[in-house]
Image (tube, grey):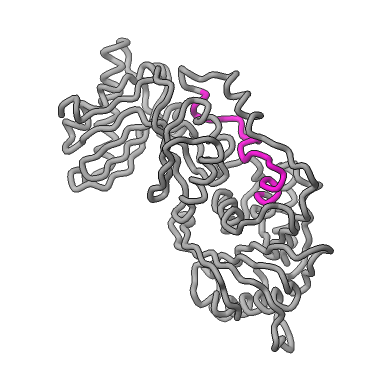
Amino acid sequence: MTMDDLELFPAERTTFPLVITTFHGLERVLAGEVMRLGGLDVEEHMRAVTLTGDRKMLYAANYHLRTALRVLRVVARCRAGDAGELYRAAREVEWERFFSNGQRFLVETAVRSPHFRNSMFVAQRVKDAVADRFRDKTGMRPSVDRKNPEIRIHVRISGKSCVLSLDSSGEPLFRRGYRVRQGVAALNEVLAAGMILLSGWHGDTPFLDPMCGSGTLPIEAALFALDIPPGYLRQRYAFIKWKDYDAGLYQSVKTQYASPRKRTPAPVIGSDRSAVAIRLARLNVTQAGLEEQIKLMILPVEEMTPPAGPPGIIVTDPPYGKRMRPADLRNIYRNLGQSLMNNFPGYTAWILSNDERSFRWLGMQHTASFELNHGGLHVTLRKFPLRRSENPPKKIVRQKK
């Protein structure tokens, strides 16, 4: 490997590349968020957005982006055609300028290359390079911690191209801090925020989730409508442990981009037939400090009616059927479609599912569709303008969620 094959971004640089990861299907939404924050050279990639930024942008991305999973600060780009090239490149990085040898670290990898068939081997070689550099520069080697590291180094190899980064987020950013307890098959917070942003809702019409479970969609909707940053409850980010952490700059970032709404947001309502789910949702809503903004009800979807005022939006995540019989699922989706058409004419429904049959059982025509990914599961979000059913059912069968 020659120096022409290695590009370094040392700690003292004022600007540097950033990689912000997200779920598949939310790349364009995330890119829009990044541009609104003032990101430069923004580009969309598979499950990620890249840009050029500084420490202020790095802090802002962690605190304000609703559809980001992690924010990575790139420290080197290099050629890595074999283990030797990878080791030499990783050893050239001035790791001691970013963190101290008393801090525990972990190397995480994402490898798609015929030259490296074992991701654990890649992690080991980079770990050795980092430890050897610290030993040469300071006389001590930092320790590896697989359970609770202070520093996370991320290695991405595609073919012979390698990117070395520091993970500035630590815990993934979907961990907002408001979830007291998690319900069965709870919707990821980042995916929930992405669904809301994909819908085009602006917070000025009613927002309803008739199968709200533990309340993730109503909470993310209220946070968005009130311009409350998704990181407002988080106490920890990995960048706080870095040597160049600027507490004053971070404090200014927490307030600079927040702009309180000039009017009271429209109603945000969540309902579920399960009393257990609503009790859990209330705990999460209280932890988020949104008791006055979100109304929760124990109510089956067929008994839910719209609030007063103009038509709004319905966004929901019905059961997918991992633990349910097809006949039960068919009844649930038929009831949902019939109830929405009969009770909410003029509204627009956005429904998430992983099964094409479920959409057919709804009995409605969609006008938009987005392919997404939720924890490795392929899911689809579809838009349904609601019109009253011309053939209402004689009886709606209630089913447990």
Query: Which residue is more in the foreground, 261 or 302?
Result: 261
In the rendered image, residue 155, in percent from the top left (x then y), is placed at 32, 36
Residue stretch in magenta: 220-240
Question: Is residue 182 one of those drawn in magenta?
Answer: no
Between 342 and 335, which is closer to the camera in this rendering?
Answer: 342
Residue 189, position as x, y percentages in the image: 58, 49
In the image, residue 243 sits, relative to residue 151, either above or below, namely above
| Picture coordinates of residue 311, whole percent (x, y) | 75, 65
Q: Decide: is 197 above or below 290.
A: below
Report if residue 66 is visible in the image: yes
Tell me the quarter of the picture where residue 24 sits: bottom left
The reply to whether the magenta stretch includes residue 223 is yes
Pick the front one: 116 or 218: 218
The structure residue drawn at horizontal position 66% and vertical position 29%, both measured from the top left corner, is 255
Q: Residue at x 56, y 56 (%)?
A: 198
In percent of width and height, residue 248 lies at: 60, 18
Where 150 sits versus 318, above or below? above
